[in-house]
Amino acid sequence: AASRGQPPSRGPSSMTTPQLKTLGLAAAAGAAFCCAWRATRRLLEAHPDDDLDGLESTLGGHSFYEVAPSSLAARHASRSMSRDASNSQLEQLALQQLATAATDFGDAGSTLGTRNKLVVAMVGLPARGKSYLVKMLVRYLSWVGFPVKIFNVGELRRRRGQAGATAEYFGNDAAAVATREGLALACQEEMYDWLRAQRGACVAIFDATNTTRARRKILAERCAAESAREGKHNDVSLVFVESICDDPAVLRRNYEMKLGNADYKGKDPATAMKDFVARVRQYEAVYEPVEDAEECSYVKLVNVGDKVITRRCGGYLTSQLSFYLGNVHIAPRRIWLALHGESQLQKESKKVGASTGGLTPRGKEFATRLAAFVKTAHASFLRAEGLADDAVVVVLTGNAQVHAATVRPLVEAARHAPDPLARDPRVSTSSLLNELCGGDFDGLSVAEIQERYPAVWHRRMADKLRFRYPGAGGESYLDVINRLRPILIELERQRRSVLLVTHLAVQRCLYSYFTGTDAEAIPYLPLPSGAVLELTPTPHGTQVQTHVLLRDDERVDDAGPSPPPPRRIPSVPERATAAA
């Protein structure tokens, strides 16, 4: 090196102290790695057939999804067994998990509030939106799995032959008050009979005006007596929900809707309206809003969404209820539900899970038509409601590849459009909107599961609502409902129109909430592909309109859509046979 004019190399004797320390640490780390590798190799050679059962016992046999985390163990065993033996082993492990998996519907059977029963007592003058709130509470509580029932004092009065009561019936003289209080007590007894018959957490809604402190005191005392009777492990809680409305337009609309109830059936509208206004005046004369001095739990809503006041809503059921009510409103909007466009894997074989690959030409055509539909439908809605033109659409999707591909034409069209109605939509993605997870069976086709794991498939078909796919992350429809709660609250909170692009199981769960579908029917809802479901929330429920964008018989290839095949007109004998 010296002959080439280069400085001589430095040996260990010429290195500084920090450099020597670094070299020593590196050598020690290398020696430790070698020792660990040799020990691991000797252990594996001594026990080649050990599986991962010890891992399950270390974790206590349960995972976050309340099933044994045997996914790794099953796959480890499958790698060292023949194909038939591994299928039998995996199916056996799956059936063991299914035997111990939770089957209760929603929170009613969970450890949170299992023994708590809740009475929701409505408060407010007639036509102040109490019935609207009651319907929303029933829809939400039923959807998340709580048994819920309405006990309406007015309905009890009508069942007892007192339909068509005039304003004098609601007067403030002693006889009228005593009659109404007797009905309220009878309705309470029906309510508590129902509560006692429920095994777990449940909600009873006492739907009446309850406008005086005296009435609310009676309700509180009766609830306390019931709790003392049931015992500390099965107590009954009481929360008042007061609805206040001073918006003239809303009040006028509510008054008109009241003329359709049984008390005014067949009566002249003008006479009926005069009598109903007189009834409201009777209540206004004695109305006492809920106050802190009553030392009770309450939720107070002003104009349904403009203002919310809560007090002492600390219990599990009560806090869930108050949080939900704090997000509801009556602002006009549209909610569009669309399945993702057809994917390549979806076309090739029906597989379990969200891994569906890229879009087919048919899927891309649907995405293009979806973008055009949303633009046109949103503009029409804004004009019909007289809303500002700068309102944008909120787009919610899962984070799978097919979700992004389905909404991409909508986003790209908005970016290049000069029309202010086509401003960039607010796109948000969330794994909460992904498809139901198949656990160990994720990625398998239906035919593969039927052939290789017939016992597991039969268990699923026997109870699709509660069946949870075995393995890490495996879900049931009830699990999907549970993880969709934050999305549902966001939909209720959102005052803009919303487009949701999801997989089938997620769309079924969301659709069931807005339409009040029975839980057992959720896994079987026949929702169309190539279409958009337009939901319009109203005080009487949700209106549903189906817009078909791509018919099933419409062929689409790389060159674009083709006209559907001509429909053959049946002959006269064929039509006669079909009619017969």
Image: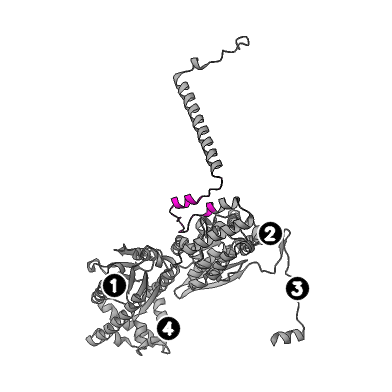
Indicate which disc residue 9 carries: none
Local packing at callout 4 (Cα closer than 10 Å; few below 14, some 14-19, many 20+) is: some
Give the farthest residue toward the top: 3
Q: Quadrant of residue 559?
A: bottom right
Indicate which disc residue 361 carries: 2
Amino acid carrying mark 4 in the image: Gly
Closer to us: 379 or 344: 344
Q: From the viewer's perspective, is the residue at label 1 or at label 3 nearer?
A: 1
Q: Earlier in the sequence, mark 2 or mark 4?
A: 4
**Magenta stretch secondary structure, dominant:** loop
Report how far apart the C-alphas of labels 1 and 3 lie in the structure.
70 Å
Local packing at callout 3 (Cα closer than 10 Å; few below 14, some 14-19, many 20+) is: few
Quarter of the picture holding the C terminus: bottom right
Kindly identify which residue carries mark 3. 566
Amino acid carrying mark 2 in the image: Pro
Amino acid carrying mark 1 in the image: Glu
User: Is residue 53 located in the magenta-colored stretch of the structure?
Assistant: yes
Closer to us: 326 or 255: 326
Q: From the viewer's perspective, is the residue at label 4 or at label 1 nearer?
A: 1
Quarter of the picture holding the N terminus: top right
Report how far apart the C-alphas of labels 4 and 1 lie in the structure.
40 Å
Q: Earlier in the sequence, mark 1 or mark 3?
A: 1
> In the displayed structure, does residue 267 sit left or right of residue 286?
right
Q: Earlier in the sequence, mark 1 or mark 2?
A: 1
Kindly identify which residue carries mark 4. 260
Kindly identify which residue carries mark 1. 230
Closer to us: 59 or 124: 59
Span colored in magenta: 48-73
Q: Earlier in the sequence, mark 4 or mark 1?
A: 1
